[in-house]
Image (spheres, rainbow, N blue to C red):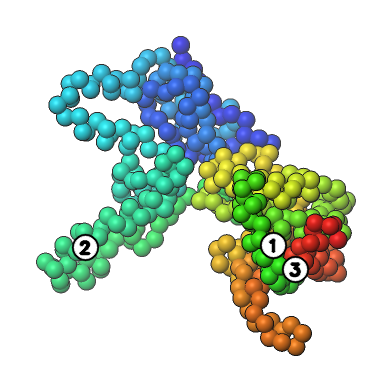
């Protein structure tokens, strides 16, 4: 009896996906609930598990193909398959056991879509690449490192023998080595559309300030060991900024509002989006009801969402419904930037690199760890006074973190 593999429901407003990669090939044995194929949507990457055990008899949608919800992806039939036949061959090769273990890991390699594409472009066997991702998953960086190391030996051996051949080889270099054309993923296309829509629709303006991180850094250093020991999660700066932003949002509700047609919707809840960079692009998972969470709760939630984002495991529910976003470009070394709104939200706070700078304090020049803050906002709904006051409120909470504890 055959079992069909179909595209599952992808969440609200998502009707189409792209085949990222198949984890099995026709003839392979599959087990029920085993990850079978990876789908890329404009919001998340998700895996489709095998609906039953058996043999993958047909693949009806190849990698890179666009498929709609309910479309037929493949068929699972009865039988033992290639995976079950391998143990039977073992006795015949009893005298040479070494090749069998070497082949097994290669067959079980899990590649991200970007890694598979990079391996094809570089012309290397992805199965021989050591994966550093979760559960040994081969990532794009792993393939790039392997590709960079591979040509080193031939170049060294050829150069002494033919010193005059280098210019000719360069002149005959194929155009494909000078540029690479890669199809945009659905997620990347959607990111591009949303960012451009935000610029075309909203009246985006950015206001800046700077914050002295001395007090919050001292507080963090004083309690970080005990915090981690008790709560099992590290105390970072993001929880302070989430709490500071919520204090500002409560005082200036327009920053937590959005426009819907000719109406303004003021949100009385605080679902804070935290921008996370992944191999597939920037995603913004949401910390629900962040105002009701403790510092430990905020840190644990952000950490869990970050892991799921990098593993491509985020659900639609975890990516939608945010009321305000925080983006930390400082983790990449950014000193200052102007973040773009995350529609339909009306405000986004940009954090940046902490850098020691000379500051004037009571007539004296002192060195302080400073961070530039940027608030981009929709000027259609938020006035300049509200935006500046909100950012000043965030600054006050960070420079005097006791305010967060006493709700001042």
At a point 43% along the width and 42% down the height, the residue shown is: 137
Q: Nearer the viewer, residue 257 or 185?
A: 257
Q: Is residue 406 visible?
A: yes
Q: Which mark is residue 399?
A: 3
265 versus 97 height, above or below: below
Q: Position of residue 261 (x, y in %)?
A: 84, 50
Q: Say few, some or many: other residues with alpha carbon within 10 Å of mark 1 (under 14 / 14 to 19 / 20 or more).
A: few
Element marked by disc 1: helix
**Direction top: furthest residue:** 1
Q: Quadrant of residue 77?
A: top left
The alpha-carbon separation of the residues under discs 3 and 1 comes to 11 Å
Q: Which mark is residue 155?
A: 2
Q: Is 368 rendered above or below residue 141?
A: below
Q: Earlier in the sequence, mark 2 or mark 1?
A: 2
Residue contact at pointers 2 and 3, CB within 8 angstroms: no
Task: Provide residue 147's location: percent of width, then percent of height.
Answer: 32, 54
Q: Residue at x 33, y 52 (%)?
A: 146
- Of the image marks 3 and 1, the number of the one nearer the N terminus: 1
- Tell me: residue 189, above or below residue 173: above
Q: Earlier in the sequence, mark 2 or mark 3?
A: 2
Q: Of 377 and 218, which appears nearest the observer?
A: 218
Reading the image, the residue beneath label 1 is 219
Comparing labels 2 and 1, the label whose residue is closer to the camera: 1
Q: CA distance from mark 2 to mark 3?
A: 56 Å
Q: Secondary structure at mark 3?
A: helix
Dot 2: what SS?
Answer: helix
Would you say 286 lies left or right of 94 here? right
Q: Is residue 236 above or below residue 294?
A: below
Residue 371: horizontal and vertical position, in percent? Answer: 66, 70
Seen at 26% across and 57% down, the residue is 151
């Amino acid at each position: 009896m055959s079992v069909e593999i179909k595209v599952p429901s992808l969440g609200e407003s998502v009707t189409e996906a792209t085949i990222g990669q198949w984890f099995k090939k026709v003839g392979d044995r599959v087990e029920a609930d085993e990850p079978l194929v990876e789908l890329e949507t404009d919001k998340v990457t998700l895996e489709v598990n095998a609906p039953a055990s058996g043999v993958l008899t047909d693949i009806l949608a190849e990698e890179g193909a666009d498929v709609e919800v309910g479309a037929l992806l493949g068929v699972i039939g009865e039988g033992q398959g290639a995976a079950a036949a391998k143990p039977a061959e073992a006795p015949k090769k009893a005298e040479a056991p070494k090749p069998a273990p070497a082949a097994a890991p290669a067959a079980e390699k899990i590649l991200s879509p970007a890694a598979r594409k990079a391996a094809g472009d570089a012309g290397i066997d992805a199965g021989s690449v050591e994966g550093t991702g979760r559960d040994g998953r081969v990532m794009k960086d792993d393939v790039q490192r392997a590709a960079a190391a591979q040509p080193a030996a031939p170049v060294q051996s050829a150069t002494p023998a033919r010193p005059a051949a280098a210019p000719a080889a360069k002149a005959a270099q194929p155009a494909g080595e000078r540029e690479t054309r890669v199809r945009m993923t659905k997620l990347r296309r959607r990111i591009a559309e949303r960012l451009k829509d935000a610029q075309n629709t909203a009246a985006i303006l950015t206001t800046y300030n700077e914050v002295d991180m001395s007090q919050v850094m001292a507080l963090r250093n004083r309690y970080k060991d005990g915090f981690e020991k008790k709560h099992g999660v590290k105390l970072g700066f993001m929880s302070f900024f989430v709490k500071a932003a919520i204090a500002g949002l409560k005082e200036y509700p327009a920053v937590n509002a959005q426009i819907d047609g000719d109406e303004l919707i003021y949100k009385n809840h605080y679902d804070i989006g935290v921008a996370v960079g992944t191999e597939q692009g920037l995603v913004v998972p949401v910390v629900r009801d962040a105002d009701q969470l403790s510092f430990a709760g905020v840190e644990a939630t952000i950490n869990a969402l970050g892991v799921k984002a990098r593993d491509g495991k985020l659900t639609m529910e975890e990516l939608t419904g945010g009321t305000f976003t925080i983006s930390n470009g400082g983790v990449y070394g950014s000193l200052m930037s102007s973040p773009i709104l995350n529609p339909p939200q009306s405000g986004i706070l940009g954090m940046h690199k902490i850098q020691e700078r000379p500051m004037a304090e009571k007539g004296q020049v002192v060195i302080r760890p400073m961070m530039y803050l940027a608030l981009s906002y929709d000027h259609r709904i938020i006035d300049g006074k509200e935006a500046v006051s909100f950012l000043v409120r965030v600054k006050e909470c960070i420079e005097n973190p006791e305010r967060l504890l006493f709700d001042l």
